[in-house]
Image (cartoon, rainbow, N blue to C red):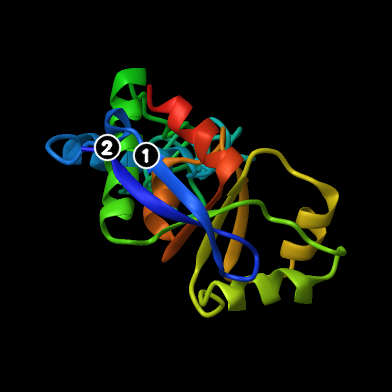
Amino acid sequence: MSKTLDILDCTGAKVGDYTIPESAIEMEKGAQAVHDTVVAYLAGARAGTACTKTRGMVSGGGAKPFRQKGRGGARAGSGRSPVWVGGGTIFGPVPRSFAKKVNKKVLTLALKRSFSERVEEGDVIVLDKFALPDHKTRSAVAILKNLKIADDTVLLTVGDFDEAALCATGNIANMVLRRAVAVNVYELLRFKKVVFTKEALDAFIGRLA
């Protein structure tokens, strides 16, 4: 069923209603899709740059360290054998990608389910527009205080970036600014409050079709 949210202005006053279409709400399925998508997102964020040297990469070891016979010990052909101190590493990590593939339909379902959960929890706020009088951080903080979310972690989603919003929100530690086309499942779940401008919410719901 459809869901209606209040549209607020930057002072926190209600200026209208926003009806989320029934097609954008999904609470019966998608829990596994959310899990798989978050796992894939976090895996893709891993650097994968750990690297060790095999015996062929370690410098030195060109000369046979001692004669083959007569010492009473095991023979050795290189001082860079993995069993020697200073030798190579066997089966050590090498640079790799941890990325996991998520099908488009699974991703769409995960977005819809995670968004629906946040709506049901009452953590989605719709702004008429994120209008700032200047580029100052205190102007952005004032809006958060008007919305009574200044102490929460906030994901602010806009239709497109503008210079004032980027400058004003860049130094707010508990707030992240995103475009509607870039919002992902992990961020929808990570933040305490999710704020959409009306324009951004229109664009985001378009992604759920």
In this rendering, the answer to whether 82 lies above or below 170 is above
Tell me residue 12's x, y (percent): 57, 70
Q: Are marks 2 and 1 in contact (CB under 8 Å)?
A: yes
Residue 160 in sight here: yes
Q: How far apart are marks 2 and 1 (CA)?
A: 8 Å
Tag of residue 3: none
Q: Residue at x 60, y 58 (%)?
A: 176
Tell me residue 111's x, y (percent): 35, 36
Q: Which residue is drawn at 84% across and 50% down?
A: 163
Between residue 99 and residue 64, name the one nearer to us. 99
Q: Which residue does the numbered mark 2 point to in the structure image?
A: 25
Residue type beneath disc 2: Ile
Badge 2 element: loop
Badge 1 element: strand
- Mark 2 crowd level (few <14, some 14–19, many ≥20, 10 Å Cα): many
Tell me residue 191's x, y (percent): 44, 61
Residue type beneath disc 1: Ile
**Mark closer to the observer (2, 1):** 1
**Picture quadrant of residue 100:** top left
Between residue 179 and residue 74, name the one nearer to us. 179
Tag of residue 20: 1
